[in-house]
Image (cartoon, grey):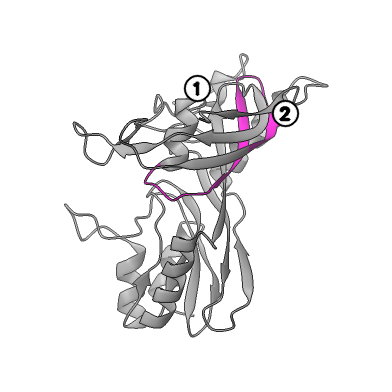
């Protein structure tokens, strides 16, 4: 495809997953903005790079700076309107993977808790049962570890920080989340008691452990449903590989299905 976009993505372990005359799908690496920063427009961001190279681009949806994975942009106004309509009708299906701190009590279920923006901390969301907007996240525990779990989350709504605040609200904050968790980097020494290093230990992960794994849309050009996927980036894979190595033999998911916050 290009150029500057390819260079930036490859240097950060991202890539162009798909491109045609109507849409472009990116596997966004962590720590790369989707839109320009309001305080520093010179920071690298996907929108500006795409606009510079393609001459025009339309934002369909967003993922957080620290979140890695799939994001779709439209190349023309008609495709943009079509995809926006799918989001409004909830015809678009998204799946995320998150490494959480804690041990889920249930193997799968639903978190149904209204969300609103904090009045005292702009940009931060909170559960607000009286005045929040309806927000639903389905989840499934993929793997269980000692004190951690790998969870697949499929949001039915698209509120800002929805998965992060929903998981934190039921006692399962995402690893390294600086807003809704403790924000502490993940070090190998935290799970391996006999770990030793000659110098300063570098964290295996220091950003929110959330990955947009897949998105399914009706293509605005062919009217056929298509699904795009992105593999876990190496920082999350490294954490999971070490957790798997240290997992006790025979430990499984001994939890039941259920719901959080249903009314």
**Left or right: residue 11 compared with residue 129:** right
**Left or right: residue 249 compared with residue 209:** right
Check disc 2 and report the residue beneath it. Answer: 245
Is residue 10 placed above or below 50 in the rendered structure?
above
Residue under the point 39% across and 49% down: 64
Image spot of residue 237 (x, y percent): 62, 42
Few, some or many C-alpha atoms within 10 Å of disc 1 (few <14, some 14-19, many ≥20)?
some
Name which of mark 2 and mark 1 comes first in the sequence: 1
Front residue of this view, candidates 225 and 101: 225
Front residue of this view, candidates 153 and 10: 153
Image spot of residue 57 (x, y percent): 35, 76
Q: Residue furthest front?
A: 263
Q: Residue furthest left?
A: 39
The answer to whether residue 45 is visible is yes
Image spot of residue 162 (x, y percent): 43, 42
Bounds of the magenta segment: 140-161
Residue under the point 53% across and 41% down: 137
Quarter-of-image position of residue 76: bottom left
Give SS at disc 1.
loop
Is residue 197 placed above or below 44 in the rendered structure?
above
Check disc 1 and report the residue beneath it. Answer: 171
The answer to whether residue 76 is visible is no
Residue under the point 18% across and 55% down: 40
Give the Cα distance between marks 2 and 1: 25 Å
Q: How many marks?
A: 2
Is residue 159 placed above or below 72 in the rendered structure?
above
């Amino acid at each position: 495809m290009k150029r500057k976009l390819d260079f930036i993505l490859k240097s950060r372990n991202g890539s162009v997953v798909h491109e045609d005359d109507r849409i472009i799908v990116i596997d966004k690496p962590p720590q790369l903005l989707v839109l320009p920063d309001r305080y520093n427009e010179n920071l690298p961001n996907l929108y500006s790079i795409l606009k510079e190279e393609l001459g025009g681009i339309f934002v369909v949806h967003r993922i957080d700076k620290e979140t890695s994975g799939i994001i779709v942009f439209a190349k023309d106004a008609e495709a943009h309107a079509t995809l926006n309509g799918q989001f409004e009708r909830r015809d678009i299906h998204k799946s995320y993977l998150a490494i959480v701190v804690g041990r889920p009590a249930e193997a799968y279920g639903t978190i149904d808790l209204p969300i609103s923006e904090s009045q005292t901390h702009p940009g931060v969301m909170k559960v607000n049962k009286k005045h929040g907007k309806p927000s639903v996240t389905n989840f499934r525990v993929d793997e269980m570890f000692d004190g951690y779990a790998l969870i697949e989350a499929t949001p039915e709504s698209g509120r800002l920080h929805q998965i992060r605040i929903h998981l934190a609200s039921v006692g399962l904050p995402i690893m390294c989340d600086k807003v809704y968790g403790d924000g502490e980097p993940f070090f190998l020494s935290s799970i391996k008691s006999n770990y030793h290093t000659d110098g300063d230990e570098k964290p295996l992960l220091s950003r929110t452990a959330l990955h947009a794994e897949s998105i399914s849309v009706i293509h605005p050009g062919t009217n056929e449903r298509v699904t795009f996927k992105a593999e876990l980036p190496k920082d999350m894979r490294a954490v999971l590989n070490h957790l798997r190595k240290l997992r006790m033999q025979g430990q499984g998911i001994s939890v039941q299905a259920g719901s959080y916050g249903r009314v």
